[in-house]
Image (cartoon, helix red, strand yellow):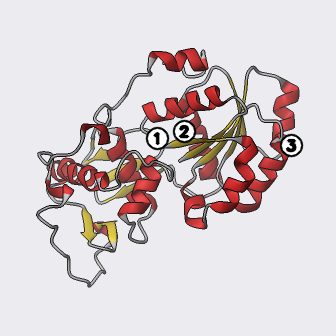
Amino acid sequence: MFVVLDDRSTVAGGYVACFEREGVAATAVEPAEFFEWFELINEGDVGVIEGFLIGAVANRRQISARIRSRCRAPLMGLIEARALSETLDLFSLGFDDVLAKPFHVREILARSGAIRRRMQTVDECVDIAGIRIFFDGRDPIVSGEVLPLPRRERRILECLVLSRNTRITKTQIFNRVYGIFNDEIHENVIESHISRLRKRLKQKLGYDPIDSQRFLGYRLKDFAADDTAPLVEESPTSLAQGTDDLIEPSSFRDEEKVDGSLRCNDYERLGDVCPV
């Protein structure tokens, strides 16, 4: 999840909308409320944050210092136009990168991924049991072929890889994919996403690579071979039974599209921030 801070609420909302079109969770926080908000969230929620995007904010110095005191997530400055003095000022405050308009969300994802790799917090790609997973928005390579995935399923697969040394719960996956403040969608939708992801991977690999245990969570089987706890069968009423189960259409929005389009009013709010 990315956190956006900008004194202009419409601009911050436009940034969030651009992230949502790419299937990436983002939330806008009012700069005046940031310090109280940052104190209230727990360490688990802080760990979900993939980057901070700071635009036109009056107290950049104080905000950047507070972020760095608690979190190593990439800190990126967003400026209206290329200006050497402003760029150098942001770097002097500890920012990891500075972007000037126009830019695209995919560029932000690529740059934040490069920053995390330099921090040695994420690999450029990971190979597991015939699956190669990238972290820059590219689809995975399964059995030597590119496997196009809906954006949410690709993000879930990335979550499983990032948490490959331990199990990850449904709630943790939901927070990473949909954000920690999303109350419009029930977290049970994750079960349906994982069910569909399993089917796609099984068609390519010939076996189901995702191991699940009720109340414990999910794990890639390549790292679950040493588990001794017996598997618990899915309940017949679980959402994980397949694609024919009834789920409210609003729960999925446009997740099945690999590349969603921007709404027309996004351009009105952002101008040329997110060209396609």
Occupied quadrant, residue 226: bottom left
Disc 1 residue type?
Val
Residue 140 at what x, y percent from top left?
34, 44
Occupied quadrant, residue 87: top right
Q: Nearer the viewer, residue 1 or 110?
A: 1
Q: Which mark is residue 92?
A: 3
Residue at image x 38%, y 70%?
167
Residue at image x 35%, y 52%?
157
Which label's residue is closer to the chain start, 1 or 3?
1
Q: CA distance from mark 1 to mark 3?
A: 29 Å
1 and 2 marks in contact (CB < 8 Å): yes
* 19 vs 271: above or below: below
- Judged from the image, the secondary structure of the residue bearing numbered disc 1 is loop
- Judged from the image, the secondary structure of the residue bearing numbered disc 2 is helix
Q: Which mark is residue 109?
A: 2
Residue 37 at what x, y percent from top left?
67, 54
Which label's residue is closer to the chain start, 2 or 3?
3
Per the image, the residue denoted by label 1 is 24
* 55 vs 129: above or below: above
